[in-house]
Image (cartoon, rainbow, N blue to C red):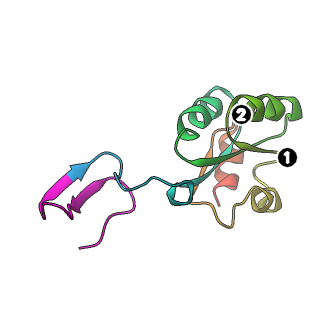
Amino acid sequence: MGQPRRGGRHRCPSCDADHFTEAPYWRSTLEDNMRIIVVGAGKVGLELTRQLSVENQVTIIDEDAQLIDNVINIYDVMGVCGNGASYEMQLEAGGGRADLLIATTSSDEINILACL
C-alpha cells in the first residue's frame, strides 16, 4: 500500500503497522506542498491565506491592488491583481498547476464562475 498524498491511513515503514495521521509526516519540502489559489481577499480569504500559507504555496487573486500589496508583504504568498473569475487570470496565477482553488468573494455568482 502506497503512502497517501494527504492525511489518513498509512502503513508505517518502520513498524509495518497501520497508523492514522491528520497531516502526512513525510511532507518536508515545499515541492510536496499543495498549490492553492484563493480568489477574494476579504475576511474569509485573508484568514484562509494566513492559515494555508504556513505549509502550502498560496496565490491570492483580488481586484484591489493595494490589498494584494499588503497581503504579499505580510504573508509568504504570491498575489495577482485582477478578476478571479477570469480563466486567463487564473492561468496567470498558476491555475494550470494548482491543486485547489478556493473562491471567497462576496458574490456567489463570481465564486461559482471562478470554480468552473
Q: Is residue 23 shown left or right of residue 96?
A: left
Q: Please tell me whether the stretch drawn in magenta is mainly helix, strand or loop.
A: loop
Q: Quadrant of residue 87?
A: bottom right
Q: Is disc 1 placed on a helix, strand or loop?
A: loop
Q: Quadrant of residue 14?
A: bottom left
Q: Would you call the spot at circle 2 few (<14 residues within 10 Å), some (14-19), or many (20 or more)?
A: many
The x and y percentages for residue 28 are 45, 52
Q: Is residue 98 shown left or right of residue 90?
A: left
Mark sitting on residue 41: 2
- Residues at marks 1 and 2 touching, judged by CB atoms closer than 8 Å: no
Please tell me which residue is depicted at 52% across the width and 44% down the height of the picture. Answer: 55
The quadrant of the rendering that contains the C terminus is: bottom right
Query: As rendered, which of 19 and 29 lies closer to the eye?
Result: 29
Picture layout, residue 45 above or below residue 15: above
The x and y percentages for residue 29 are 51, 55
What segment carries the magenta color? Answer: 1-19
Q: Earlier in the sequence, mark 1 or mark 2?
A: 2
Q: Disc 2 marks which amino acid?
A: Ala
Q: Quadrant of residue 18?
A: bottom left
The x and y percentages for residue 97 are 65, 65
Please tell me which residue is depicted at 20% across the width and 61% down the height of the picture. Answer: 12
Decide whether residue 16 is among the magenta residues: yes
Residue pointed to by mark 1: 82
Please tell me which residue is depicted at 87% across the width and 29% down the height of the picture. Answer: 66
The x and y percentages for residue 68 are 80, 35
Query: As rendered, which of 55 and 45 lies closer to the eye?
Result: 55
Q: Disc 1 marks which amino acid?
A: Gly
The quadrant of the rendering that contains the N terminus is: bottom left
